[in-house]
Amino acid sequence: MENVINVAITDDHVLFRQGVKTAMGMKKDIKIIFEADNGMQLLNTLKHTQPDVILLDVSMPVMGGIETLPEVKKLYPHIKVIMLTMHDESTMVAKLMELGANSYLTKNSDSELIYEAIKTCHEQEYFFHALTNKALIDELKMKRNGEGAYAQDVKLNDKEVMVLKLMCEEKSTKEIADIVDLSPRTVEAIRDKLKTKIGARSTAGLILYAVKNNIIDG
């Protein structure tokens, strides 16, 4: 039997939650373990029940997704968070990716796209698609125009460059560890060191840096 991915839905629209729950209920490897109306309720529930993946609405009463996302990432960094919104503004996507979102979907996404995002984020940490890619490219262009705040003249050693390249190829921590012959814990330490060196707050920020500095082809 396949490993089951435990998922939580945080959205103030009951009908939307019900629709996602029904669609994901058809998948043998997805289990919706709880629902929440807002970010505050989500954080309270996470104290005793942690899913693998959270579907998190951007706009909710009491506590919205923008305020909730950094709290979830700070307290439970292992949980993958997919942001949901009615809008597809590039600036919003880039901001949320910088805050640590693992993907970003509009609420009119079909159930197969939501399923693919859950699976991919769980297995590979990030799910990039046309919307997220456009947002990151737009953000990159803006940073190239002098509005970026990444550290200049950063010296990366060969191992750091190799890890960064593999991250950009969407390899998981375990896959990178196997390729560079290091433990997964050491790979995570290198990733954290890269963030500090470069001044990036998330893996999306590291990928932007890699493209900007021709470490990978953009």
Image: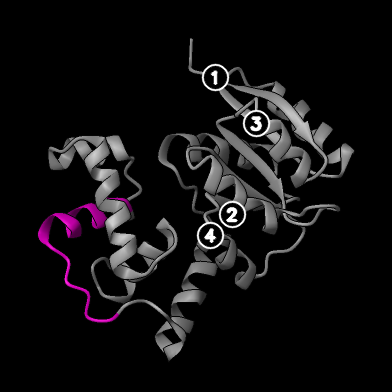
- From the image, state whether disc 1 or disc 3 is nearer to you: 3
Q: Which residues are magenta?
A: 152-167
What label does residue 4 carry, if any? 1
Amino acid type, residue under disc 1 in the picture: Val
Residue 40 placed where, x, y %?
Answer: 76, 44
* Nearer to us: label 4 or label 2: 2
Amino acid on which disc 2 is placed: Pro
Ranked by sequence position, the earlier of labels 4 and 2 is: 2
Mark 1–mark 3 distance (CA, rounded to whole Å): 21 Å
In this view of the protein, can residue 159 be seen by the observer? yes
> In the image, is residue 178 part of the stretch drawn in magenta?
no
Mark closer to the chain start, 1 or 3: 1
Instruction: Reply yes or no: does residue 155 show up in magenta.
Output: yes
**Which residue is at 69% across, 27% downward?**
24
Give the amino acid type for the residue marked by disc 3 in the picture. Answer: Lys
Instruction: Report if the CB atoms under discs 4 and 3 are less than 8 Å apart.
Output: no
Q: Earlier in the sequence, mark 3 or mark 2?
A: 3
Which quadrant is the C terminus positioned in?
bottom left
* Residue that mark 2 sits on: 70
